[in-house]
Amino acid sequence: MDNLLLARWQFGVTTVYHFFFVPLTIGLVFLIAIMETLYVTKKNENYKRMAKFWGKLFLINFAVGVVTGILQEFQFGMNWSNYSRFVGDVFGAPLAIESLAAFFLESTFLGVWMFGWDKLPKHVHLASIWLVALGTTLSAFWILTANAFMQHPVGYVIQGGHAEMASFGALIGNEQLWWEFPHVWLGALATGAFFVAGVSAYQLLRKRWLEVFHPSFVISIIVGVVSSILVAIVGHDQAQYLMVSQPMKMAASEALWHTSADPAPWTVIAAIDPAQQRNTFELQIPYALSILAYNQPHGSVPGMLELQQQMQQKYGPGSYIPPVGVTFWSFRVMVAAGVLMILSALYGAWQMVRDKLLQSRRYLRWMLFAMPLPFIANTAGWLMTEMGRQPWVVYGLELTRDGVSPTVPAGEVLLTLISFSVLYGLLAIVDAYLFVRAVRQGPEPDGEDSEVPDLNVAPL
């Protein structure tokens, strides 16, 4: 293997691993802020116990997320020096703002929140957790500003063989960003909601601390219903934007080799033969792709081979077709996980309305298995986003092969890839151990026997 392939594997492994923690950080702190708001407004101590319990899990996740994120920025200099030289003047600005402003905002007020219980006025302490939530959201915004530039470069000029920023306003006004950011943020809320719902379901099945975990489940399901439905709506609009900004990615996500008929059918599953550039089997739904692409039952969708000819005329010889199998199936895994999330959240809301939640033991067991769904959807979505952009590292500006460090041998990249993978594996073990221990310990006692079920749960 050459250094390009190994560098891509290394960045892919570290990014996917890091992104397990990022959405949970964003979503979980938002739920904690809601819980503490209910504590301050309702003056019910159970909500304080809830906020403290979920805060312990948040701190564990936050710490591991910070550690895993640091390695990603190192790789820009280690493995992708040509990329950093070419677009660093543009790409580095939002990363610097994220580090110097957003991260310091969330970390500073997280410390205030951690050590400020019973030391600060309640409203000041509540403001600190909302500022942490704001900081995590701003961190996501600035990181996605940088990623949006890679997907759709704007606000730059080429000077002296590299890109320089021409308009910071254009960078943060990038249309790609304003489709990408709400989709990721809503997905993070859904991640936090399903995590809280899953842990709460575990405790409800064991009939432990019902006065804490029943309201936790209710809050998480409400957030889960809203966020999972909205993330699907925004994702649909984002896919329609791809028809304009990256039609090749859209065609690859549908394994559409030739421009479709009018109306275009949607391929549910396919047997893809990339060597022959065709599908040997397809299960299709008539009209569906036209509806997905244009919100109307007519209209053709350009195929990869026709787009390949157009891109060769524009950019020169070469293959501009991304890995079709990965792009096609990651999109379907994301959609399938998202549909299951919506159905799971809606069923939970229906059971709550019927006041049958505690009796729905099969559903509570299912929510334990549903906890990974948003993580699966997040990972699959990013695989589609990043693999579907190939062979570009910056779409239309720089090919991935041109961004890799030319002087770093493959052996060194392989060594660091193995080292990082082992380190991340150990961190995963530690993280899982700390999570399990915190869940088993449960919330802080309220002066009563916390093991005795309290069926008079606190209403919302």
Image (spheres, rainbow, N blue to C red):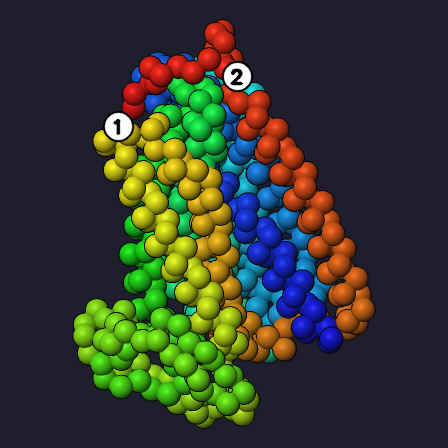
- Number of other residues with Cα within 10 Å of mark 1, as a class: few under 14, some 14 to 19, many 20 or more: few
| One can see residue 51 in this view | no
**Disc number at residue 371?**
none
Q: Tell which of 101 and 367 is nearer to you.
A: 367
- Any mark on residue 444, and which? 2
The residue sitting at 63% across, 59% down in the picture is 13
Q: Residues within 10 Å of mark 2 (few under 14, many from 20)?
A: few
Give residue 436's position: percent from left, percent from top: 59, 32
Report the residue marked by disc 1.
355
| Residue at x 44% of width, y 61% of height | 333
Q: Quadrant of residue 204?
A: top left
- Does the image show residue 383? yes
Which residue reaches farthest left?
Answer: 297
| Residue that appears at 64% across and 48% down | 68
Indicate left or right for 243 with 298 as reference: right
Residue positioned most to the top:
447
Residue 166: x and y, percent? 46, 67
